[in-house]
Amino acid sequence: MKIDHVHFYVEDAKVWRDWFVNYLGFTSVASDIHSFHTYTEAVKSGVVKFLLSSPLLPTSPVAEFLRQHPPGVADIAFAVADVEAAIAHAEMHGAIVLQSIEERQLGDFRQKCSKIAAWGGLTHTVIESLPETHPTPPHQIITAIDHIVLNVAAGELEHVVSWYEKIFDFQPRQSFKIQTDRSALYSQVMVSRQGGVQLPVNEPASKNSQIQEFLDFNRGPGIQHIALQTVNLIDAIAKFRQRGLSLLSVPQTYYSNLQNRSGLPLSTVELTAIAQQEILVDWQQDSDQGVLLQIFTQPIFGQPTFFFEFIERRCQAQGFGEGNFRALFEAIESEQIKRGTLH
């Protein structure tokens, strides 16, 4: 299993097509979805494909979504080898099928797909894998989706984890409890059997948690952020800043504290460049499992809901660094304080 594409529902698909092209360096490509009630654009970078849909009529599913939620991710499409088997398995374990299996023509290929309900306004399209096409061009900044994060209500985490285990055979990996003086969250990372999909699931562990703030503004569960891989995060973020992309701030004291940790796997010159771009760094003590570099945008829509993460995994670094997780949590807390939603 792998992620085929992610589908955003937005108010103006053309505006967001231009946003992805101008800020993140995506390429606009032809959309293979056409409808009289919905307008759809598609953008791509490497193997990452996003669909962007906006309503043409009040009867559009996008219009219905936007009446219930702010703009954001409505569907994550999983590519599988056998759609019939995947849907039969999902139905047997209680999944609600929203769209029966159908075939569509894509160039020289016919592709089967179906859709099931997930959490809140989120759905999962199950789509037949197509043969690999061309490799990622060397100039692409974004090369792959690293992980996608789902936020759910307090008390739902265990149920959601069980659902993804039963429906898609995802396996639990790392778990976290992040707590500060002000708020807290629980997180469980779910991974598909072959590792092609990573889905951390968060729930609030305090009433004023940033996860609860997301749920309030989103009016229910939903996708909090998507992490996009890049091979050179320092250069990528320098380009994004030059284009005007808004990113979360990291205090310079964070980098002073990094230097006090033993085994810092960065040269002084590189740490200076990382601090200049306000990138988070994490690694495991006494381990050669590599280094995680991560940074996060401000929420990209009008409300504090969805944002992007950019990540570089050096030396095949695995998992999710708890130090970076905590630093992200504290950075979002700072934004909550500015908004007046955390005291």
Image: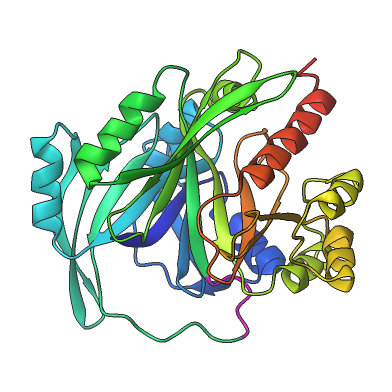
Residue drawn at x 62%, y 60% as measured from the top left = 311
Q: Position of residue 24 (x, y in %)?
A: 66, 66
The quarter of the image holding the N terminus is: bottom left
Residue drawn at x 25%, y 40% as measured from the top left = 165
- In the displayed structure, does residue 45 sit left or right of residue 249? left
Q: Position of residue 315 (x, y in %)?
A: 58, 72
The quarter of the image holding the C terminus is: top right
Q: How is the image coloured?
A: rainbow
Snapshot quadrant of residue 159: top left
Residue drawn at x 27%, y 55% as measured from the top left = 193
Snapshot quadrant of residue 204: top right
- In the displayed structure, does residue 336 sit left or right of residue 46? right
Location of residue 338 with respect to 182 vertically, above or below = below
The answer to whether residue 266 shows anywhere in this view is yes
Residue closer to the observer: 264 or 179: 264
Residue drawn at x 21%, y 83% as measured from the top left = 108
The answer to whether residue 117 shows anywhere in this view is no
- In the displayed structure, does residue 238 sit left or right of residue 171? right
Q: Position of residue 187 (x, y in %)?
A: 50, 33
What span is colored magenta in the figure? Answer: 139-143
Q: Position of residue 196 (x, y in %)?
A: 36, 61
- In the displayed structure, does residue 31 sit left or right of residue 299? left
Location of residue 145 with respect to 68 vertically, above or below = below
Query: Is 226 inside the magenta-drawn segment?
Result: no
